[in-house]
Image (cartoon, grey):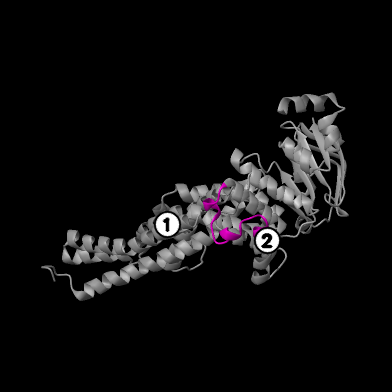
Amino acid sequence: MIEIEGVRKSFGALDVLRGVDLGVAKGEVVSVIGGSGSGKSTLLTCINGLEPIQAGRIAVDGTEVHARGTDLNRLRRKVGIVFQQWNAFPHLTVLENVTLAPRKVLGLSRAEAEAEAIRQLTHVGLADKLSVYPSRLSGGQQQRMAIARALAMQPSVMLFDEVTSALDPQLVGEVLDTLKLLASEGMTMICVTHEMAFARDVSHRVAFFHQGVIAEIGPPEQIFGAPANPETRKFLSNVR
Amino acid sequence: MLGTALTLNDLLFLGRGALVTIAVTVIAVLGGTLLGVAFGVLRAHANRWLLLPLVFLLDVFRSVPLLIQLILGNAFQAVAGWGWSPFATSCVILSLYTSAYATEIVRGAIEAVPQTTRRAARSLGLTWRQDMASIVFPMGLRVALPSWIGLTLGVMKDSALVLWLGIIELLRASQILITRLQEPLFILTVAGAIYFALSFPIARLGARLERRWREDD
């Protein structure tokens, strides 16, 4: 579903990604862990074409992301992304937040878009907040709305960029439950996360990022049980 | 009438002057805002070196006193042989003057929309235009409104300067009456009251919109 080969990315003199290889199969959940500034989040913004890359290739569902002539707006319909900051559109109600892109980008009618939005909002537990403005929601609710907003585009892949990092601790659980639900339904997901328990319980594979490369990747039992790389061991002993 | 020589006809004369003030203001604010939106979008997105000439020109319009702009502009159009009426000349100069301020208001409003919000919109597949139309303009409008109301009220008062091109707007009309009736305080009070009556609804409308938007979000 996602093929990443030899991807290099730098911001000026700063090399953020230094040759990343990763393949994600359909229905697979890959968690990406690692220290701050290791390039985890940058990789996600490269996958949906928000950032250009300097070398290598990324393909999503057969589409070359950084090829000349690739319609990025078309690609982004297939790749949902949710950020650390939930980025609600403050001037729109919850329902309007979720129906905006399906109506503008997919060209759905209002009735079709609303039916789908209500389905997704029910899915994330916000069915009773349809006509509320985002400022009346808690951070966890806003983040779940952002997830519903991305899901309403019927993506084939979902990318999650530290979606619980900006939340109050007591709100983290509700968002992680939503992610677990999606994983159990077979959504293809890459989750950049600091929630080690989540990475261990939900993912099929865990990738440890260090200094712009994937230093170690494997099933959670390997990464958390018997990490081969000394940097992985060091990182895990620090976060526990 | 109240122990004054001011007749109903004189009041109608003031009223006609007020209509001219309204016409000049509406045209200048409309034209200036349209130009300001176009320039402001450019200012917020295009390369700053490419925009240097535009920025310089707008700085000139903001820095040189309006009176000088009106007189020079009028002389220029006469020399160039365009044959514009004083009213047309006034509207064009005032529009440019307004656009210089409106550009900065629009640029500020666009830049007040967080990059991360725009990024989220683009990542949903919205094009640049759709992002501008559905996210940036509605969010920016809430930021821009108070300054824009202020600009409109300012332009209405500044529009009095077009009397130097021989246009009889509200202030000029009151001066004519003062010369004839020699009742400066009373007539200026009436003229001031008319200016207030024109401005007040605009200020109230602005306050009302702000309140409604605050209740929204």
Q: Residues within 10 Å of mark 2 (few under 14, many from 20)?
A: many
Residue A134: give x, y in percent of width and height.
56, 53
The region drawn magenta spans A121-138
Q: Are marks 1 and 2 on the same chain?
A: no
Residue placed under numbered mark 1 in the picture: B211
Residue placed under numbered mark 2 in the picture: A101
Against B146, is A211 above or below? above
Residue B56: give x, y in percent of width and height.
55, 47
The image quadrant where one finds the N terminus of chain B is: bottom left
| SS under mark 2 | helix
- Work out how far the residue at label 1 is from the one at label 2, CA to CA, in angstroms: 28 Å
Which residue is rendered at x = 52% and y = 62% of the image? B80
Q: Which mark is residue A59?
A: none
Between B159 and A208, the one lying in front of the other is A208
The three-letter code of the residue at mark 1 reads: Arg
How many discs appear?
Answer: 2
Residue farthest bottom in this picture: B9
Residue B11 among those drawn in magenta = no
| SS under mark 1 | helix
Chain letter, disc 1 residue: B
Tell me where residue B4 sits by quadrant.
Answer: bottom left
Left of B179 or right of it: where is B76? right
The three-letter code of the residue at mark 2 reads: Ala
